[in-house]
Amino acid sequence: MSKNPFRYGSVVSGTDFCGRDQKIKELTQFIESGQNVVLQGERRIGKTSLVYETVRRMKKRRLLLVDLMEVKTIEDVCTRILRAIVQIEQKSILKTLAHLRPTLSINPVTGDISVGLGATQDLNAQSVADILKLVAVNHARKPLMVFFDEFQDILKLDNSKELLALLRGEIQYQGDVPYVFAGSIRNHMDDIFNHPDSPFFKSAISLDVGPLSQQDFVEFLEMKFSAGKRLVEPDFMAEIFKLTYGVTGDVQQFCEALWSVSNEGVTIDSNLLGKALKLIFSREGKSYEIILAGLTANYLNILKALSALGGLQATSAEFVSEAQVANGSTVRKALTAMEARKLVFKYEENWRFTNPFFGLWLQQI
């Protein structure tokens, strides 16, 4: 039996990475010139994998990844930056940051390094800037590329503007160190990099990461299916892209489910659609139920209307009637609130589910 070749929910590289040769070329040129870059693109579109694959191909460049997803405190930011530096270079870390009393421990099973800070003084935004100075030290030993993922989550901190100003101040003096910033909420990233009042205004060149070329992606997916002695009906491939908005991670997830519910020698077509979705629902059902528990009746009705009618005319009379709410303003406010909770997002003029499978699941309740 062939191994399922489809991967989702994690970074992919090498033979699992598809296309984007032009983006890799552009990003490589920016990195080599020390240019800071902000990656613009929707969630699960492949921004992180693009960075990993670019650095992998460069070979002589090291990747320092700082994941800021759901960061809550200044100490959390400090710890995440320090952990990333420790993963790259452990020498002199404890001595350099002695005033913060850092502690390191290694998981004997996984080998993962844990970092703790026991500073006698309160950690503040300046502490983050001080830790960031270590980047330049390590870059001098061997070139780095620093990647801040989910950078927009810094805005959740009470003193975010001060922190952004100090980060910007430190980064601008590390001119030969390329920094790449990515986030999954486009309007928040715009607030950081495109608003005149932001310390990061015009501090990085924008590189848009959109859906993969459908032709290239279809050929890639068909090759994966073919290796497992499965064929895909061409019209059904188009349906897969429609259901998932062509988002790379969601397409891969759906293909993984299709592989799991099919056997060698079959042609994958719409007859397997229900089985694949049922498998996804069974895996994610608990998380869906948790989401439902936190929704008001109005929010749930609006999400059901979004699933049934789509989000291009989310404030139309038809949508308002379907959602059983008072008016379009109620819909607009609710969608904006649910965008902050990462349940939906706005792509151009179209409201979409962050998880399209959750939207499909709502149709059956």
Image (cartoon, grey):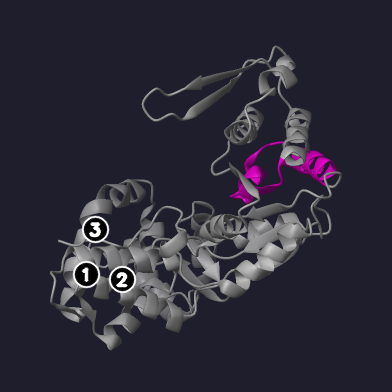
- Give the label, 1 or 3, closer to the camera: 1
Residue 165 occupies which quadrant of the picture?
A: top right
Determine the secondary structure under disc 2: helix
The residue carrying mark 1 is 228
Residue 289 image label? none
Q: Which residue is mark 2?
A: 224
Q: Amino acid at mark 2?
A: Lys
Dots 2 and 3: beta carbons under 8 Å?
no
Mark closer to the chain start, 1 or 3: 1
Q: Position of residue 250 (x, y in %)?
A: 38, 65
Q: Position of residue 17 (x, y in %)?
A: 45, 64
In percent of the image, x 58 and y 59: which residue is there? 57
Task: Calculate the distance from the C-alpha at mark 2 to the C-alpha at mark 3.
Answer: 23 Å
Residue at which label 3 appears: 281
Which residue is depicted at the point 42% across and 52% down? 10
Bounds of the magenta segment:
142-171
Name the side, left or right, on which 310 lies relative to 100.
Answer: left
